[in-house]
């Protein structure tokens, strides 16, 4: 069957509205109980609806005979890294990542720390919709609590150190988005010797990603200027992405981070496979920059999962997305904003230069991105399947062929159509983008 609920990063929506309801979570827990035997771990971020979904998932799992290990509040990268060490069949991560508090989501992590495949989520979705679960009164699971699961992650982080205080002399602003890294990230940077100014570290269930974090970087940039800091680091609510700013408060996107880390890892002899993996969403300038350094450059479909799959395929240890997901697989199997931030800081100190003298690392090609929001995913599907819309998209691709690219896709997490036009000629980019947007916005 078609994979309708699960997107590129799990299933997501508004809490208490299908599919982010207690009833759906209960059924998904039962479906996971059909797919797995043994123990299943559950972690969550700081948003208020996490407790509701956690309880329902645990009830569904235990009703099918699975034992459940509750991990409490943990960042997604921590949950992914420690899963192979917990002796569990899988981990459920409850989080809507960078979305506001009224949204929530469910991410599914395999025993090896990697996310579920499309085939696995399609099977789960079919079972949830069939709602035909055989319950056995003699087969009921139990629940245990493990609130020290972060310990092996912190030990892994410590292995990044080359001396006792590798970030000594660096003044860092870190914005934790009032999310899952709020109690962890500032202390780790202090342990590494940095002078830390922490913001977005007072989660109350409702303020996750609100006016802070990687999707609202004004707080980070303003604090860097106010505190005369060397770098600003903004995480998102579940800690799997990062956006940075320089010492003058200039925001730098994920492509600039990819370029800097690729260059740093290569110069340090740590870029496995001599390769960087990004997605079709990354700027053409990034590819030119990497190839200019003699680094092999690979593109995948949008979604961190596709980046990690390609990395595993070619034996690479670094990849990322323009949105800020950075995968340094020598340390974690998924995007990890804290590890990426630490690595950027160590690379910065190695240059002995101010960030504003280094960034931007490369010059971007002209690119226009529009996020067109609709009332529902069903409306998005209707628009994307419209014959005139498809005809316009195909004509646009032909117009920029050999000179750029056109990408029009559904968001995997929100009712959005994302339109991206890139090319070497700014006027062409604007013209083509307008043609596509004019057709799509007629449906709004």
Image: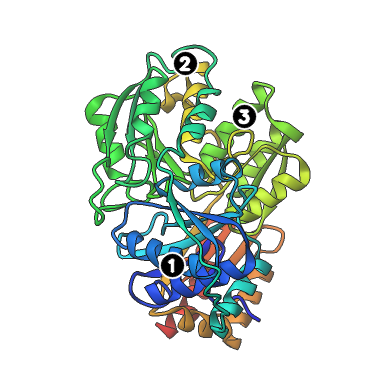
Q: Quadrant of the C terminus?
A: bottom left
Residue 267 visible? The answer is yes
Q: Earlier in the sequence, mark 3 or mark 2?
A: 2
The structure residue drawn at horizontal position 34% and vertical position 65%, both measured from the top left corner, is 52
Q: Which residue is mark 1?
A: 59
Q: Position of residue 344 (x, y in %)?
A: 50, 29
Q: CA distance from mark 3 to mark 2?
A: 19 Å
Give SS at disc 3: helix
Q: For mark 2, what is the residue?
A: 166
Q: Are marks 1 and 2 in contact (CB under 8 Å)?
A: no
Residue farthest along the front direction in this orientation = 138
Q: Position of residue 31 (x, y in %)?
A: 56, 72
* Vertical side of 443 occupied by 276: above or below: above
Structural distance between the alpha carbons of marks 1 and 2 = 45 Å
Residue sitting at x 54%, y 41%: 82
Query: Residue 139's x, y, as percent?
Result: 55, 68
Using the image, determine if residue 131 lies above or below residue 166: below
Element type where label 1 sits in the image? helix
3 vs 2, front mark? 2
Q: Residue at x 26, y 30 (%)?
A: 225
Which residue is identified by label 3?
263
User: Which scheme is used to colour this image of the protein?
Assistant: rainbow
Please name the residue shown 36% across and 37% down the image.
250
| Callout 3 touching callout 2 (CB < 8 Å) | no
**Looking at the figure, which quarter contains the N terminus?**
bottom right
């Amino acid at each position: 069957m078609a994979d309708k609920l699960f997107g590129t990063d799990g299933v997501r929506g508004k809490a208490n509205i299908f599919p982010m309801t207690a009833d759906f979570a209960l059924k998904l827990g039962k479906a996971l109980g059909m797919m797995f035997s043994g123990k299943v771990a559950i972690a969550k971020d700081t948003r208020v609806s996490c407790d509701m979904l956690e309880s329902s998932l645990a009830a569904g799992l235990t009703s099918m005979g699975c034992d459940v290990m509750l991990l409490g509040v943990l960042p997604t990268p921590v949950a992914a890294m420690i899963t192979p060490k917990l002796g569990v069949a899988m981990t459920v991560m409850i989080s809507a990542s960078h979305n506001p508090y009224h949204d929530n989501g469910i991410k599914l992590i395999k025993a090896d720390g990697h996310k579920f495949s499309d085939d696995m989520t399609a099977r789960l979705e079919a079972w949830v919709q069939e709602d035909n679960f055989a319950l056995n009164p003699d087969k009921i699971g139990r629940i245990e609590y493990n609130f020290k699961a972060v310990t092996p992650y912190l030990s892994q982080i410590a292995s990044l150190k080359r001396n006792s205080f590798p970030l000594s002399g660096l003044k860092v602003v870190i914005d934790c988005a009032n999310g899952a890294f709020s109690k962890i990230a500032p202390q780790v940077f202090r342990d590494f010797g940095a002078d830390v100014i922490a913001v977005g570290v007072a989660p109350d269930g409702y303020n996750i990603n609100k006016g802070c974090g990687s999707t609202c970087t004004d707080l980070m940039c303003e604090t860097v200027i106010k505190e005369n800091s060397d770098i600003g680091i903004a995480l998102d609510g579940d800690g799997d992405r990062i956006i940075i700013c320089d010492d003058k408060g200039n925001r730098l996107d994920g492509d600039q981070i990819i370029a800097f880390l690729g260059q740093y890892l290569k110069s340090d002899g740590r870029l496995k496979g001599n390769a960087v993996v990004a997605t079709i969403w990354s700027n053409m300038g990034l590819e030119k920059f990497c190839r200019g350094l003699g680094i092999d450059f690979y593109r995948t479909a949008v979604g961190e999962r596709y980046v990690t799959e390609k990395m595993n395929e070619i034996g690479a240890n670094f990849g990322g997305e323009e949105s800020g997901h950075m995968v340094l697989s020598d340390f974690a199997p998924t995007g990890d904003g804290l590890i990426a931030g630490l690595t950027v800081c160590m690379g910065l100190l190695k240059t002995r230069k101010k960030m504003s003298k280094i960034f931007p690392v490369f010059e971007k090609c002209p690119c226009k991105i529009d996020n067109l929001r609709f009332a529902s995913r069903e409306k998005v599907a209707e628009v994307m399947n419209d014959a005139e819309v498809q005809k316009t998209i195909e004509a646009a691709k032909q117009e920029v062929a050999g000179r750029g690219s056109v990408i029009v896709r559904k968001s995997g997490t929100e009712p959005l159509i994302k339109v991206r036009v890139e090319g070497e000629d700014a006027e062409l980019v604007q013209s083509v983008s307008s043609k596509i947007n004019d057709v799509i916005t007629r449906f709004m």
